[in-house]
Amino acid sequence: MDLDAAIRTRRTHKAYGPDPVPRAVLEELFELARWAPNHFLTEPWRFRVLGPETVAQLAAAGGPGELEKLRRAPTLVVATVKLNGDPYTEAEDRLAAASAVQNLLLAAHARGLASYWRTPKLLREQPGREAVGMEADEELVGLIHLGTPVSEPAAKERKPVSEIALFLP
């Protein structure tokens, strides 16, 4: 799949097949994620693949209904950014970590995987952070759902380029 096609055809999926993504494939995705632009070369992104015990702890921290959301996908990855206390560097690092997640999503799609980038409140609160071992100097970038697709969601309409781009003199 060429890059243009990957960008245009990647979709958010909320239903997945039952098989987890193999570790070797996840390692390939993380290898590609780490090539995201990173101005200060701090490589601030962190990825945690959640096993069944951690998913259960996270669901318990979230309360009713959370387990059903977490069980949508057979593989869950918590993406975080490691912060260093400097506001300028941290702003750059947040953007770099988000770029790393986009790399991961596109690489997953190119491998025929479905994905969903969520930012659940649960992982911004202390019980959820503790459930996944997030350190005090880390901030959530997203909870990434991964698995095999069971359907192909339709593309959603996008604004035309003329509404989002300015060409300045």
Image: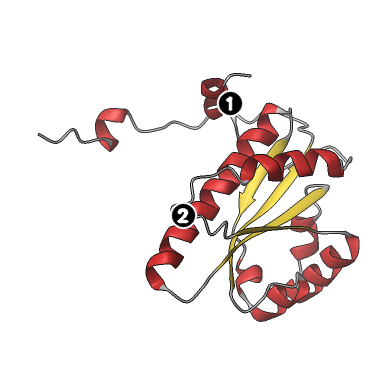
Q: Position of residue 128 (x, y in %)?
A: 71, 73
Residue type indicated by callout 1: Ala
Quadrant in the picture for residue 92: bottom left
Q: Nearer the viewer, residue 46 or 106?
A: 46
Compared across the picture, whether 87 is left or right of 122 comes to left
Closer to the eye: label 1 or 2: 2
- Local SS, label 1: helix
Q: Position of residue 149 (x, y in %)?
A: 76, 32
Res. 167 visible in picture:
yes
Q: Residue farthest to the front?
A: 41
- The residue carrying pointer 1 sits among few (fewer than 14), some (14 to 19) or many (20 or more) residues within 10 Å by Cα, namely some
Q: Residue at x 49, y 60 (%)?
A: 94
Compared across the picture, whether 43 is left or right of 114 comes to left
Residue type indicated by callout 2: Leu
Can you say whether 160 is above or below 132 in the image?
above
Can you say whether 89 is above or below 97 in the image?
below
Q: Nearer the viewer, residue 84 or 65?
A: 84
- Label at residue 95: 2
Residue annotated with mark 1: 6
Q: Nearer the viewer, residue 16 or 95?
A: 95
Q: First in sequence, mark 1 or 2: give its number.
A: 1
Tell me, what colour scheme is on the image?
secondary structure
Q: Nearer the viewer, residue 61 or 167?
A: 167
In the picture, the quarter occupied by the N terminus is: top right
How many numbered marks have been drawn onto this rendered protein structure? 2
Q: Position of residue 47 (x, y in %)?
A: 70, 57
Q: Residue at x 72, y 48 (%)?
A: 145
Q: Position of residue 106 (x, y in %)?
A: 61, 34
Q: Residue at x 47, y 77 (%)?
A: 85
